[in-house]
Every structure is written in C-alpha cells, then in structure tokens.
Amino acid sequence: MRAALRSLLVVNRAAVIGAGVVVALAAVLLAVTAAWLEAGVRHPEAPFLSTVAGSFAGTLLLITVFMVASVFAGVLRERRREFALLRAIGATAGQIRGTVRTEVLVLLALVAPVGALVGTVVAPLVTPLLRSSAVVPATFSLAPSAIPLLSTLVVLVPTGLLAAAMAARAATRPSPTDAVRASTTDVPTLSRGRQIAAAVTALTGLATATTPFFTPGLVGSATGATSAIVLVVAAALAGPLLVQWGARRALTGRHGTASTLALLNARGASRRLSAAVVPLALLVALGTVQTGTDAAVQRATEDQLRAGLQADLVVTAGDGVTGAQAERIAALPGVRGTTTVRDTAGSVQVEQADEDLGGLEWEPTAVCALSADTAALDPAVRSGSLDALSGPGTVAVSSDLLALTPTGLGDTIRLRTGDGPAESARIVAVYDRGLAFGDVLVRDRASGPVDTLLVDTASGDRAAVREALRATGADVATVDGYVATALRAGSGDRQLSLVLVVALLAFVAAAAANTLLTTTRGRRDEFALLQRTGATRAQLLRMAGVETAYTAVAAVVIGTVAVVPALVGVGYGLTGSAAAGFDLVSWAGFAAAAVLVAVVGVQPAAGRIARGR
C-alpha cells in the first residue's frame, strides 16, 4: 500500500492527476444518472424520468466504460519501461500485476467516492430543467440516497481492474529481456484475434445501421443510431492499422523535414497515436449522431403533423376549450365538422407482465383522446379502423409502440390514464404517425375542457369562420401556425437532450485531452534523442504541430465515416429521406472541438519538452 501511494502521489503524479480527473468526471455523471433512475422507480408520478434516465444511462455506461478503460490503459502503457526494468531486476509477473491492481484500487478509492458524492449533490440541481421539459411534475423533489454511490463503484471498480489486468498482462507476457527491448518501441502489428474482432464489430455496426430500412420509425432509428458508437469501437480495435495506413499514404508526397519526421512517427508509433485519435473520433461521432437524430425527429414530427391535421383551423385556449364553446363553434355557419383532442399522461403495458421486472414493463406515454368525429385528424392508419374506437375497452396504438413486440391488431394491452386504475384494452387500429399524435389514441369519454379543437370549414368559408372564431375570444391558428407552435413547445425536450449531450461530450473531451497529454509527456526521451542528433527546437515544434494536425484530421475522418451510416438510416427511417439526419453546422462544430482538444492536449506539453535541455 505504501509503495502504491508513493507511485500515485510522487513518482507518477502527473499522469495520475489526469486519470483521476477523468475518473471523477465519470463518477459525477454516473451518480447523477443513478439518482435519476432511482427517483423514477420510486416516484410513479414521474414515469418519464425513468425513460429519460434509462436512455441516457445506456449510452453513458458504454462511453464511461470505454473511456475510463482507455485512460487507465494509456497511463499504464506509458510505464512499460518501468515494468520491464522491474522484471529485469527480479520482480515476478504476479508482483507486477499486484502492484498495478493495488494502484488502480487506491486511485479509485480516493477519487470515485468524491465524484459520486458531488454527483449526488448536483443531481437535484437539474430538477428545474426536468420540470421545464415536463419530465417531472412541478412538485417533484429529489431526495439524497446511497444508491448513486454504490452504483458508481459497481461500474468503475470492475472497469479499472479489467483495464489494469489487460495492461499488466501485456507488460508481463514477454520475457524480461524482450520486455525491456519492446518498451522503447511500438508493436507495428495487431494480433489476428484483434483484427478479426475489429472486422466483426465493423460488420455489426454496418448491419445495425440498416435497421431503420427494415423497422421504420422511432424504434428502428434509435437502434440504427447506436451503429455510430459500434463503428467507433471497431475503429478503436483497428486503430493502429488505420493510423499506419493514413500515415503511409501521406508519406507518398513530398514534405519538409518536420512533416516527414512527424508522419514517420505516426506510422511507427501507431498504437500510441491511435489511443489519442479514437477518443476524438468518438467526440465527433457521438455529438453528430445525437444532433442529427434530434434534427430528423423534429423534421419527422413536423411532416407528420402537417400531413395528419386535415382541419383548416385549430382552436386553443389557455384553460382549454369547454364543451359549450365546442358546441357553439360547431354550429357556426361554414363549419363542416370539428374534432376535439385531449392529451393526458399515462402508461401502457404492451406485453404480458413479468413479475421479475417489478412493474418496469409499464411504459410512460401520452394518451390522446379524440371525439367521435375524427375526420379532421389522420394518423395514417395501417390496419384496423378508428371507427371501432366507439366500442368499450378499445384503443388505437402507434406502430412504434408495437415495434419488436409480438403484439398486434386484435390483441389486448393494459392502459393506465393519469392516476386511474389499469384497464385492459383491445387494439382496434394501428397507425404510423406516432410522433405527431402520440402512441395511444382512445375515444374521449371524459368531461371538461379539451386541449385542442380542430375545425373543418366549407370551401371558401375559411376567412369568415376564422373571424367568427376570433369574435368568441378563442385563439385561432392555421395548421402551419399550430405546427410551428407545437414544435416550439417541444424545445424543452431538446434543451434537456442538449444538456445531456454536452455533459457527455465534455467528459469525452476531458478524457481525450488527458490521453493526448499523457502520451506527449511520455515522449521526453524521444525529443531529447532528436535534439542530440541535430534537430532544432523549431523543427521539433513543427513536427509536433504536424502530428497534431494529423491526429485531428484522422479523428474527424474516422468519426465522420462512423456516423454517416447511422445518419443515413435515421433519416430514411423517420422521414424517408436519407439526408434528413445530416446537420452540417453541428458536424463542423464538433469537428472544430476535436481539433481544439488535439491542440490543447499536445502543443503546450510539446512546447515545454522542446524548450527543455
């Protein structure tokens, strides 16, 4: 233990501080997410909280494990010579593994609980944003708990130990003599097993990207979007080969001394460079796929609303449209028909209950109650008929809700509206425009004001009807105006999504910068040798600049290639247009962020090393 503390706090302090910061950030994000998940389970009045937290938790868990393992592996990789020399003077492989394992556990014990406690404190501060996005009710409050701390340790401790075990195995596998010789060079090839794993992962990612072509809608698009991360993982497995190939191609042209030296370094030290390229590629891919998916969802929602609203005018009111107002409007000259729409929060159980899930099979949803006359609203029914909603215990559901389930037309689901009891309902219609009108449609049998009144007018009477409606004091809008207002009302959800993505990308950027800084610090001997053989400080700085540019360009290219299949699938699955998911402005922003992280992570440290004697 004393040796581990000395290694962490004295000998390898610079590298450990960076790794500790990454672990602390990971602990904060994991604790915040765990607190939301726990609150969603304990508070049934906030069903959407579990959905939002669960969706974010899946991505966060994958990214956290990947980045934390990468950071630990990078720090331990820079200590290959130390481990090799210890073995050369008599240390056994078991002692090396024990030392590495102890150091990782001590670092986690010092940093992870602190980060988890900070996350537990931060989690309630996000409650106002959750309220503004209608994820939780106005009276919701988040109570502190020990679950976030325990959940954080459950994720980080095995991840750190696994990374330590893999790094220690790589350091202790060769003989002591071979280890000393290999510690000064980079292995130029990959094992056959790693190459096969990279190929299989890449094929899996491409296959996942095609999901929206076979399962259109939100479910298929969400599945297809994950292909971007899978393809980045494939790039991580094949990273050294990709870096070598790019450097080899770049060397075919004519370059100056500094550029040639930088590209030769990139080709010869491909493992070291790929460890810096992959996190930056993940930054580009993750940010681009998230913003592109949000853009495609918004466009699909807009298209479905415009196509599904068959009315000429839309009437709304601050306190809702009362039954008396609806009757007066229906009796106005020029009005051919009206459809009332009432939105209510609820939850649905599509498949048979599983006792092991403890009620988690209930999915929160918005229940849209319609009047008997549904002529002004077209949800694009693919099977069944909305006319059958007149029967008791009947319901129409979206195809997104039934995707990847055996449930279909004629089957029975369980529905819970508001605080009411669960009731069985038979599916009498399945429709496609779930983004516009929600996942569940029922016949409105409640009393009281409704949210929206759709008004269909006779040909040529729209202007006169509109003036008559305004005279009643109601808020009247055209379909285009109503769609624009509805999309603005959903800005709270997009703001929450943006905050979550920014937090995740900040973590990825910090991990990438730490990896770059660690690898640059580990090149002191290389820079010193180049200076002894005649390289000037200016040449070394130019060489570092070219390597930085190559790292940034490689990261942007890999991240872009990884995200294109996902965006094509998402755009096609949601809107029928492969280009709908591409947001070039956002992509340019994330590419610029990757370049900035590369510059900040390499140039200052390289400058200090080059200026040293």
Image (cartoon, rainbow, N blue to C red):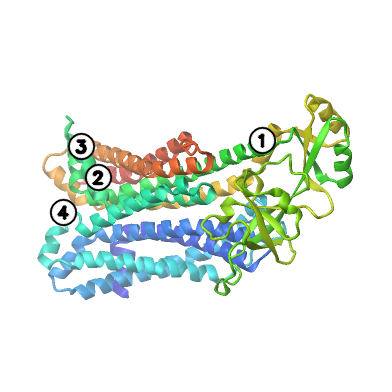
Alpha carbon distance from label 2 to label 3: 10 Å
Mark 3 vs mark 1, CA separation in Å: 50 Å
Residue type at mark 2? Val
User: At x 23% / y 59%, what residue is drawn?
Assistant: 193
Please name the residue that numbered disc 4 is placed on: 185
Q: Position of residue 119 (x, y in %)?
A: 53, 61
Q: Which residue is mark 1?
A: 484
Q: Which residue is mark 2?
A: 243
Q: Determine the residue positioned at 48% across, 63% down.
A: 115
For residue 97, above or below residue 248: below
Q: How crowded is the residue under tag 2: few (<14 C-alpha within 10 Å), some, or many (20+)?
A: many
**Disc 3 marks which amino acid?**
Arg
Label 3 sits on a secondary structure element that is helix
Task: Using the rendered view, name the quadrant where residue 416 is placed.
Answer: bottom right
Looking at the image, can residue 515 be seen? no
Q: Secondary structure at mark 2?
A: helix
Q: Amino acid at mark 4?
A: Thr
**SS for tag 1?**
helix
